Image (cartoon, rainbow, N blue to C red):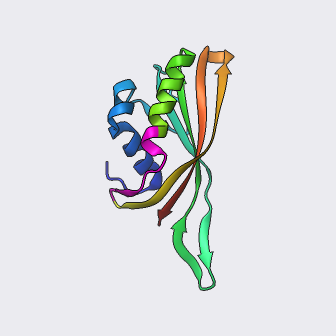
Amino acid sequence: MSVDTIEKAIRSILVNNSTVKAITTRCYPATLPQDPTYPLILFFKVTGNRDHHLQGPSGLAHPRFQVEAWATTYDAAKALANAIRGALDGYKGTVGTVVIGSILIESERDVYEDAVSCHRVIMDFFVWHSE
């Protein structure tokens, strides 16, 4: 799969990070599969802001992504969240054809999902990248 979108770049960063990979390589955009195996990562774009200057679009985007660590125990969810944060927070570089200026964490919160008996840690990241 060629990495030509910010979504594919974020997934690539996560599944190729050795600390994350030691916990899971299950990383899904937007929705979970039916009857998923835990632990896993779910991520999606929350907002899709683009930068402008007086001449029009600058070619930079700064979306907010929500990245979630899901696991059957609180400790496992926190361990995966810590690995995700380590992989993404402060990241800058080029993944495939996507040039990332920075990825910075904005917030983090813990949630328990009664419906599936799972813990999840929800993190919001701001991503600056070229389009």
What is the span of residues highlighted in magenta in the rendered image?
Answer: 86-96
Specify whether residue 35 is in view: no
Rendered view: 33 above or below 7: above
For image coordinates 39% across by 60% down, the residue present is 98
Rendered view: 47 above or below 113: below
For image coordinates 51% across by 31% down, the residue present is 81
For image coordinates 35% across by 53% down, the residue present is 3
For image coordinates 37% across by 57% down, the residue present is 93
Res. 4 image quadrant: bottom left
Provide residue 17's location: percent of width, then percent of height.
35, 38
Q: Nearer the viewer, residue 72 or 115?
A: 72
Q: Nearer the viewer, residue 130 or 102?
A: 102
Tell which residue pokes out farthest to the bottom in this image. 55
Specify whether residue 42 is in view: yes
Magenta stretch contains residue 120: no
Provide residue 66's location: percent of width, then percent of height.
59, 42
Residue 21 lies left or right of residue 46; in this view the side is left
Provide residue 73's location: percent of width, then percent of height.
54, 14
